[in-house]
Amino acid sequence: MDAQPNHGARRRRRRKKPNSPKAGPVEPVFIVARRPDSPRLEKPTRRMKAASARPRGNGATVVPKEAAKERKPEAEVKVEEEGTLRKERRQARIVVRATGAPDETEKNRLRLLSRLMAAEGRAAISRAIDAYLAEGFALPREQDAQLKLLEHFDETKAAGAIAILREIIAVEGPRQLPVLRQRLRRLEDHADEESTRESAAQLRRQLPASG
C-alpha cells in the first residue's frame, strides 16, 4: 500500500512567522495654552506645541506691555530746561474760517446792489447809488451797473461811467444798445459840462448802428 502524503505533519512543520511586537499605547499630543506674559514652566519639546492666546497677524509686530507702557504721547514728554522739568505744550490748532457763506458786509453789499439794479427813474437811481457808495462799496465795472450810473444827477459820476463803458464795450461789445444810446444822447444834449457832452457824443458815435 502506497504511503499517502501526510499533509497534517507538513502543516505542523510549517514554520510560524515570528510574532511582531505588539504596538504600545499611542501617546497623546499635549497642546499647552498659556498667556503671553506668563513664564514658561519648561522647555517645549517637539511633541509639545505652545499655543499663543494672542495670535500674530501677517507681518505684525507684537509689542510687549512693558514697552507699550514706556511709550507716551509727544505732548506728555517732559523736557529738561534750566534744571527744571516742564511739560511740553501742545501745538495750537489753527481753525480756518469757512469762506463759502458770505459775511454780513457782503450780504449788505448784495442787498444794496440789488436795490440799485431794480430802481427806475433818475431820482430813484441816484438815491440807490448814493446809498450804495455811502457804505464804502465800489460800483462793479459791469455794463449794467455803469449804465445805471449814467442816470445820476451828478455829472461827474456820469462822466466816470462813460469812460468805464468805453473800455468795456471795446472788449465785449455793447448790451442794451437802445437804452445806452438814449442815455448818451441825453448827456450829449443836456449836460452842463462841455467835457461830459463831448465824451457822451464820442461814445455814442462808436456804437454800432443796430443791435
Image (cartoon, grey):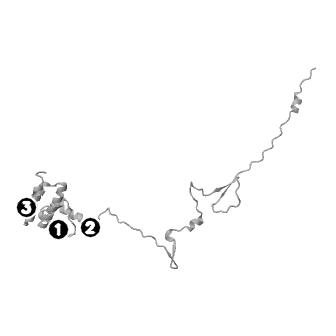
Q: Spatial distance from mark 2 to mark 3, Cα to Cα? A: 38 Å
Residue situated in front as seen by the camera: 185 or 130: 185
Label annotation for residue 130: 1
Q: Which residue is mark 2?
A: 105
- In percent of width and height, residue 174 lies at 16, 55
Image position of 71 (left or right of 101): right
Per the image, label 1 sits on a secondary structure element best described as: helix
Q: Amino acid at mark 2?
A: Thr
Label annotation for residue 73: none
Residue situated in front as seen by the camera: 18 or 108: 18
Residue lying at the far top in this picture: please name it.
1
- In percent of width and height, residue 23 lies at 78, 45
Q: Amino acid at mark 3?
A: Glu
* Residue 131 seen in the current view: yes
Q: Spatial distance from mark 1 to mark 2, Cα to Cα? A: 17 Å
Q: Which residue is mark 3?
A: 188
